[in-house]
Image: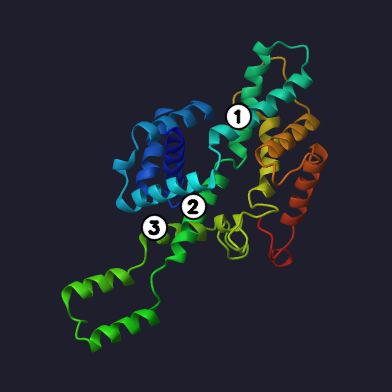
Amino acid sequence: MKEKSVAFEQALATVWWILRELRDPGVLAIEREVFAHASGADAEYRARLLSLRIEAGWSLKELDCVARELCRLLEVKFRELAIPANVVLSDRVFKACARFVRQKYANESEARLLPFARTLTLIALERLPVRELPQAQAAFAVLNDLRKTMRPSKRELSKLDAWLDRRGLAKAEQVKHARDRLAAPDPVAQLLEQLFNIDPAPGNNGTGYWREFFDWRGRVRSKKLPPFRSMFQALVDALREPTKFGSPAYTEGFALSKADVCELAARCARTAFPEWFDRYFDGVALRGAIRDHREMHERLPEQRPRYRV
């Protein structure tokens, strides 16, 4: 029962994310309401308040029938794929940050180290796609299932019309209604197709941003994912100057050098995405990845046809 509850929460959060990506007016209104109430608060408080608002107020009864069916399909897929919940991934990142600060400040007490580790974790989780990847994985799996049972083609429908006409059934009201329903596009599949066609940076290569999480076989890419290219620089900047990016200031007495920031960012990436970053991915490798992305970004679009910036 507990597993189903976790899968349901993951599915509901994913529906929220999909509708937000598609700029759904209802979802955006709830977000504006929460952020207006938390005006002036830090990012952690706003995120926690929004999470509580989703759990307490935005339930299945507030969804239309399409989103409700999508939620049901996603819940099944989260259970089938055994995709870890955000809480599990967040806990792993926290442990990595805690180990890092214990090594750097070995003489400090746990009472001072743990709050600092929590602050670093919150900064990292805001920049690492620990939420987007599992949600995109479940949503794409649902879309692929729907494609396998997709509506018949126009040619197949024409054959059906001819067959019904020969038997004098084409004008029967019940048959006509059934035929129209058969020809109608699946609304859940349409919603997901819109999601995977979104391109926040037009002119890259014409492929939707979320579609690029997957290869031509529909599997999660075994190499670089789209957000990895800009993730490192964003994470390094936020760890070096937390208050500049809306995070709380570090506890007095704690500071991170540039080398520390790169090493911590590399550890967080290894912890959150062990399939993509092995134990040899350290601060030096991360700086190299940032440099490579910057050089690619400076090229003309025609010089990077398969690279999204």
Q: Element type at marker 1?
A: helix
Mark closer to the chain start, 2 or 3:
2
Q: Is residue 20 left or right of residue 59?
A: right
Please name whichever residue, 140 or 286, is drawn nearer the observer in this view of the structure: 140
Per the model, the C-alpha gap separating discs 1 and 2 is: 24 Å
Per the model, the C-alpha gap separating discs 2 and 3 is: 10 Å
- Residue denoted by label 2: 139
- 306 w.r.t. 45: above or below: below
Give x and y (percent) for residue 134.
Answer: 55, 45
Judge the density around disc 1: few (<14), some (14-19), many (≥20) Cα neighbours within 10 Å: few
Residue furthest to the bottom in view is: 166
Q: Is residue 177 left or right of residue 46?
A: left
Q: Element type at marker 3?
A: helix
> Could you tell me which quadrant the N terminus lies in?
top left
Image disc number at residue 91: 1
Mark closer to the chain start, 3 or 1:
1
- Residue denoted by label 3: 188
Give x and y (percent) for residue 103.
Answer: 78, 21
Give x and y (percent) for residue 9.
Answer: 43, 38
Could you tell me the amino acid type at mark 2? Answer: Ala
- 201 w.r.t. 119: above or below: below
Could you tell me the amino acid type at mark 3? Answer: Val
Mark closer to the chain start, 1 or 2:
1
Which quadrant of the structure image shows residue 187?
bottom left
Could you tell me the amino acid type at mark 1? Answer: Asp
Q: Is residue 86 left or right of residue 154?
A: right
Q: Residue at x 36, y 50 (%)?
A: 67
